[in-house]
Amino acid sequence: MTIKDLLKETSSGLLSNKVRTGLTMLGIVIGIASVISMLAVGNGATNSIQSRIESTGSNLVVISPGAVKTAGSNVKTSRGSANTLTMSDVDAIKSGVTSAKYIAATVSTQKQIVAAGMNTNTSVIGTTPSYVEIKNLVLDLGTFFSDEQVTQLSRVAVIGPTTRDDLFGSGVDAVGQTIRISGNEFTVIGVTLAKGGTGLGSADDVVYIPINVAQQFFTGNKYVSAINISAQSADLVTDVQNQATDILLSRHNITDATKADFSTMNQSDMLETASSITATMTALLAAIAGISLLVGGIGIMNMMLTTVTERTREIGLRKAVGAKKRDIRLQFLIESIMLTAIGGAVGIVVGIAIAWGITLTGLLTAKISLMSVLLSFGVSALIGIVFGYYPAARASNLNPIDALRYE
Amino acid sequence: MIECKNIKKTYINGEAETQALKGVSFTIKDGEFVAIMGPSGSGKSTLMHILGALDTPTSGTYFLDGEDVSKLSDDELADIRGGKIGFVFQSFNLLPRAEVIRNVILPLVYLKVSPEEREKRAREALTSAGLEENRWHHLSNQLSGGQIQRVAIARALVNNPSLIMADEPTGNLDTKTGEIVLKTFQDLNKKEGHTIILITHELDVAEHADRIIHIRDGAIVTDEENKNKRVIKICE
């Protein structure tokens, strides 16, 4: 029996009951389409979360104070609120960490802000100009404050777009206006471009002022809330983290690294955490889709068993005219593989269409990987073999005499 | 050339043993037209299955063209059926969804004959079986009973078999159509020299053959030349 003969036999077998073939195929189509679209949604979600994390700054290492890890008997304040990092630590890191590109310390507080009869309560971040580079801030209007303005203790402020909207109304050019932070007057010199993201810690609802102004007027001490360092490249992030840790440990006279009075965190840690979450989510989606594929496969087996029973006499005749077990087995196996392969191909098209549709809704950009397409096509062919084997074996083992007599 | 020596077949069904054939021996030479006759339950179907290489005997030997067929495996039996035997069944057993010509080609597909050769041999077989050429591309459910049985005869001829086994070939046909089919067998035997075994329970069908083997209760009762041979004259 040539391949052409087999294809002819199987296609005429499949076409003989088009409705049943179509419905059985539909099971595989739905299974494959859901695997492809769910993986695309998972990949898309992973990408969007990663790009959001990366948008907070590139190759970032953040050092925050007050991570005393050993359990003590004394009551502790919340992590990061301890006063262990100072401006001289920042200077030491500046001169000591060779792989750093930009360094910016911050002093963060939460303050009531008033302007022209409107008011809001938001975070006030005291920092230095390199913060712009580290956080990829883009100015919509005006400029960020300069190093001179920091050293001259200038009372200037750069505000986020949400804060601007709250204080002056949306779209108003706030540059040159005056705001009062806890009663102290500041001149607005710039407004940043919206970065997206809402809620607590949004990069859009914030006021930036020179770091030493923040220390002098609001915290009243020389401590800093965080030191942000951006490494020269992604490979150097760990270097930066290690160098900064060593410098701070020696400056704080700590020999045991586990008892450090500060903590460091880099962006790849955050990315890792986020991607492990999204990987779990993707696996979950794929598992649900996989179940529908399995159900589709059982549908194939059910149909093939019915077909074999219905065509018992035909099988008997084929055997009588010289078909061997192998010929019969191959015929029915190819029939089920053909069923799943066509179903799989249609499923891939439908899956891509669904992913495309999800992208069109704007929720997220579903990303179809070639890998998932090849994999699901392979899986569908495999389902044909696995679920088609038993019915095909049953057909091939029929006794020709009994099969010919079958009514 | 068929040589059967002391063929026995026993079916075991739970506790009960049924002896369908109790030691049957005979020889059929090439070019003979033999009818095996007997009532239902006589063992003629069992004998037909063994002669047709659909089944093997419990004991005894069956030589077909000098080859011992009685001890072969399933796949070896399939080879024998495909290469040396042509079947015509009472219930025709055509593939309903396939054209006449594809039905006739079917045995050649399993014999691995090239597509060009298949087509040629199928045409020859259909001509020998006497089916009009304008029916060759019809589906079998568009044909009459007599035409269907001619397709089945063509299918039995297409592999140029040593032996044609016809199992009640007229059982589902009216008398007149049955006569035409039997005439076809006689012609194939006389003009083309095919060896034919006709299995039937009706004497007037068996009387179309040259030799009649009567079988009853799993044993041969008589095995003699048919003295009342029916020669059919068909009035067109």
Image: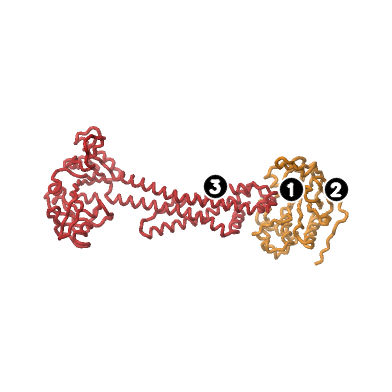
Chain colours: A red, B orange
The residue indicated by pointer 2 is B222
Q: Secondary structure at mark 3?
A: helix
Q: Return the x and y of residue B62 as percentages of the image width and height.
A: 77, 43
- For this rendering, which residue is in front, A102 or B142? B142
Chain of the residue under label 3: A
Q: Return the x and y of residue A311 as percentages of the image width and height.
A: 64, 54
Crowd rating for badge 3 (residues with CA inside 10 Å; few <14, some 14–19, many 20+): some
- Which amino acid type is shown beneath numbered disc 1? His
Q: Is residue B58 left or right of residue A362?
A: right
- For this rendering, which residue is in front, A349 or B114? A349
Q: Secondary structure at mark 2?
A: strand
Question: Does residue B196 appear in the picture of this structure?
Answer: no
- Which amino acid type is shown beneath numbered disc 3? Val
Outermost residue on the right side: it is B227
Chain of the residue under label 2: B
At horizontal 12% and vertical 52% (from top left) the residue drawn is A154
Q: Quadrant of residue A162?
A: bottom left
Outermost residue on the top side: it is A255
> In this rendering, do the residues under marks 3 and 1 share a single chain?
no
Chain of the residue under label 1: B
Q: Name the mark on residue B49.
A: 1
- Relative vertical location of residue A25 with respect to residue A221 in this rendering, above or below: below
Check whether the beta carbons of the residues at disc 3 and disc 1 lie within 8 A of each other: no
- For this rendering, which residue is in front, A161 or A152? A161
Q: Name the mark on residue A386.
A: 3
Distance of mark 3 from mark 2, alpha carbons?
55 Å
Question: Does residue A399 appear in the picture of this structure?
Answer: yes
Distance of mark 1 from mark 2, alpha carbons?
20 Å
